[in-house]
Image (cartoon, rainbow, N blue to C red):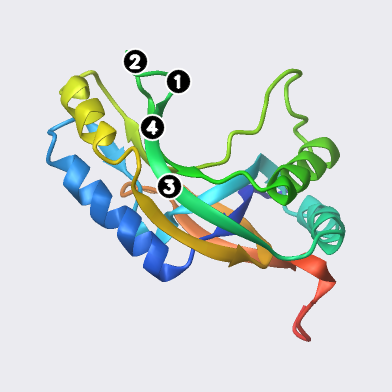
Amino acid sequence: MSTIRAFIAIDLPEAVRKRIASMGRELAQSGADVRWVREQNLHLTLKFLGNIEEDRLDSATRIVRDATARLRPFDMQLHGTGVLPGRKRPRVVYVGAGAPVELFQLAGMLGGALDPPEPPGRRFLPHITIGRVRSGKAVERLVKELDRHDDTHFGEFTVKEAVIYESVLGRNGPTYTVRANAPLGGAFSPKD
């Protein structure tokens, strides 16, 4: 049985992706050893499914659509930057996402209904990963540059759907392919 690497995400409008990518190019000037996420791949992950059997994708899609049908579209703001797990040993560079209640509701529904189950005590931290730190080279300089963007506003948009992506890892980073859309409020298009 063939498997695919999949995740559920919220897409970002093109203008927002461009603003974030522009800042990423600026941060790259720090000289830190970071693998930056390509502009077209910027998204907010709701749930990472990992490697799942292709035939489980249909059932996962039904679960996601059931969850999104229960919520109306909602507004989200992207602002500020940070690192995970912390400033001393950062591994992920991110842009922060405003935390509307609907976003937490959606992430909670998906986390509880889809495998793999979320580890006990793990809380959802809405963010857009913009880079992954590969070594400690120039990390202090990177963190100082990030501090300058602490109050940067990257945009506001209305979340109208969740997207199920297939992720194929390659030499130049992952390539994402849309496998299914799950509109909020249950407004499915005829092609679904």
Amino acid under label 4? Gly
Residue type at tag 1: Pro
Front one among 140 and 182:
140
Answer above or below: position of 76 versus 110: below
For label 1, the residue is 85
Count of numbered labels shown in the rendering: 4
**Which element is circle 1 on?**
loop
Dot 1 or dot 3: first in sequence order is 3
Q: As drawn, which residue projects farthest toward the top?
A: 88
Check residue 82 in the rendering and tell me which mark sits there, or answer none.
4
Foreground label between 1 and 4? 4
Give the farthest residue toward the bottom. Answer: 190
The answer to which quarter of the image holds residue 86 is top left
Q: Earlier in the sequence, mark 2 or mark 3?
A: 3
47 left or right of 111 in image? left
Q: Nearer the viewer, mark 1 or mark 3?
A: 3
Report whether residue 93 is seen. no
Percent x, y for residue 103?
Answer: 69, 48
Q: CA distance from mark 2 to mark 4?
A: 12 Å
Q: Residue at coordinates 72% horizontally, 46% vertically from top-left?
A: 101
* Distance in Å between CA atoms under marks 1 and 3: 18 Å
Q: Is residue 18 left or right of residue 44?
A: left
On the image, the x and y values in percent for residue 168 come to 49, 51
Could you tell me which secondary element the residue under label 3 belongs to?
A: strand
Query: Which residue has dot 2 on it?
Result: 89
Label 2 vs label 3: CA separation?
Answer: 22 Å
Q: Position of residue 182 (x, y in %)?
A: 74, 65
Classify 10 Å Cα crowding around label 4: few (below 14), some (14-19), many (20 and above).
Answer: many
